[in-house]
Amino acid sequence: MSYAGDLTPQQAWDLLESTPDAVLVDVRTVGEWQQVGVPDIADLDGDREVVFAEWATAFGPNPTFVEQLTEAGLAPGDGRPVIFLCRSGNRSIGAAVDATAAGLGPSYNVLEGFEGDTDLYGQRTVNGWRLRGLPSTTYTAGE
């Protein structure tokens, strides 16, 4: 595997809760953050915030993705766990692979993502961070 591994949403929360230097990175698009909401980790020790960095944009891969992670305080070789979250747990695999290749992490993917898998009707009602009752909030521009 080219990244540290996969975590369920609860395992991701538990790692964030037990490891104060762990970082949660939401790699969805700005539109998803604004329309669907975002994870909220502000109540964890140290009043931490989610890092928002699009892994892919409407125009394709984000060429400054790793640079945005380093600007957010991550450094190659620092050993800080980095947990990547997207809508359903697919884009976040690519983000974890890219971060690992850049020396960041250990880097993890959150299975199920923020919204989770679709049901028989195409609605995201099966699983995911939000459906599992983990903290979430609305996105405010400039976060």
Image (tube, rainbow, N blue to C red):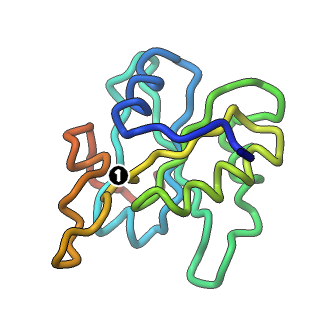
Residue 75, percent from left and from top: 78, 34
Most distant residue in the bottom direction: 59
Q: Tell me: 105 left or right of 90.
A: right
Q: Mark 1 falls on what kind of element?
A: strand
Residue 19, percent from left and from top: 52, 17
Q: Tell me: 138 left or right of 62.
A: left
Toward the viewer: 2 or 67? Answer: 2
Residue 106, percent from left and from top: 69, 32
Residue at x-position 65% and y-position 59%: 94
Question: How many numbered marks have been drawn onto this rendered protein structure?
Answer: 1
User: 10 Å neighbourhood of mark 1: few (<14), some, or many (≥20)?
Assistant: many
Identify the image quadrant of the N terminus: top right
Residue at x-position 47% and y-position 24%: 15
Label 1 sits on residue: 38
Q: Tell me: 70 left or right of 122.
A: right
Residue 42, percent from left and from top: 36, 31
6, above or below 48, in the image: below
Residue at x-position 21% and y-position 57%: 126
137, above or below 27, in the image: above
Residue at x-position 35% and y-position 45%: 39
Label 1 is placed on what type of residue? Val
